[in-house]
């Protein structure tokens, strides 16, 4: 993914110097946007089973809810047809695992996670056809990751949850269709990395596939 984004950014930088993009670019500098889609986390039932087994519990069985809806609200400024910056707020959804064990005696443990926060991205854009462009984004997010834990039976928890405020990484690649000079439609894939830490059950990584729109003014 990193190599793909590096190549995309280099291509965007080179392509955006051409005269065609200037002919297509709308005059408005400021814009606002919104996007909604599905997020998938790196919460993995097999890894949870391995961890529980390493603690001395036998026959663990874990179910994981690793997908949820995510949305993003943004405000941006276009310095040039090729370069923009965006401020955004993102709610990245909620995820969970449920584990039962048979030995040394029956028990269960549940973990619930959620993440949201504010960020800043740099966007590079280039045209690929009239009214149609490709863009890449790279930035950071000040994210809050929250985890809560509960147990029954043979499981004993040292704490019932934690929250972590941390600077996370954010990057993505998308396509935009300009319906009018004021309205653009977007389809995008994004990745949010390094959310949370060991206190929240480990670092969370989220991939988001979304559809959205931008309104220029």
Image: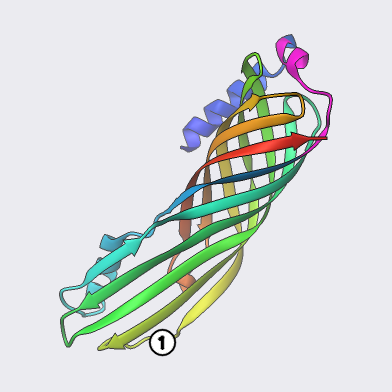
94 or 165: nearer the viewer: 94
Q: From this viewpoint, which residue is outermost toward the top?
A: 19
Quadrant in the picture for the C terminus: top right
Please tell me whether residue 176 is drawn above or below residue 200 in the rendered image. above
Q: Check if residue 33 falls in the magenta segment.
A: no
112 or 137: nearer the viewer: 112
Q: Is residue 170 visible?
A: yes
Indicate how the structure is coloured in the image: rainbow
Horizontal relation, residue 115 to residue 139: left or right: left
Q: For mark 1, what is the residue? A: 158
Horizontal relation, residue 201 to residue 16: left or right: left
Task: Find residue 207 and report its horizontal and vertical position in percent.
Answer: 47, 47
Task: Find residue 162 and report its horizontal and vertical position in percent.
Answer: 52, 77
Quarter-of-image position of residue 167: bottom right
| Mark 1 nearby-residue class (10 Å; few <14, some 14–19, many ≥20) | few
Residue depicted at x 64% and y 18%: 127
Please tell me whether residue 80 is drawn above or below residue 146 in the rendered image. above
Residue depicted at x 81% and y 31%: 79
Quarter-of-image position of residue 62: bottom left
Q: Is residue 196 visible?
A: no
Task: Find residue 180 and report its horizontal and vertical position in percent.
Answer: 73, 24
* Part of the protein shown in magenta: 20-31
The local secondary structure at tag 1 comes to loop
> Count of labels shown?
1
Task: Find residue 192 and report its horizontal and vertical position in percent.
Answer: 53, 50
């Amino acid at each position: 993914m990193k190599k793909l984004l590096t190549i995309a950014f280099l291509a965007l930088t080179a392509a955006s110097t051409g005269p065609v993009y200037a002919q297509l670019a709308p005059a408005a500098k400021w814009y606002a946007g919104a996007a909604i889609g599905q997020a998938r986390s790196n919460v993995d039932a097999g890894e949870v089973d391995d961890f529980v087994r390493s603690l001395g519990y036998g026959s663990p069985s874990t179910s994981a809810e690793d997908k949820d809806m995510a949305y993003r609200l943004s405000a941006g400024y276009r310095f040039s047809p090729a370069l923009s910056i965006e401020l955004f707020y993102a709610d990245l959804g909620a995820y969970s695992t449920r584990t039962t064990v048979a030995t040394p005696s029956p028990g269960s443990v549940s973990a619930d996670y959620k993440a949201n926060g504010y960020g800043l991205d740099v966007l590079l854009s280039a045209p690929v056809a009239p009214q149609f462009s490709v863009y890449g984004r790279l930035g950071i997010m000040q994210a809050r990751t929250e985890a809560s834990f509960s147990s029954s039976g043979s499981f004993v928890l040292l704490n019932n949850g934690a929250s972590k405020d941390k600077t996370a990484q954010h990057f993505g690649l998308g396509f935009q269709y300009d319906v009018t000079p004021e309205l653009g439609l977007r389809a995008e894939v994004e990745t949010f990395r390094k959310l949370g830490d060991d206190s929240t059950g480990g670092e969370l990584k989220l991939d988001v596939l979304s559809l959205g729109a931008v309104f220029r003014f």
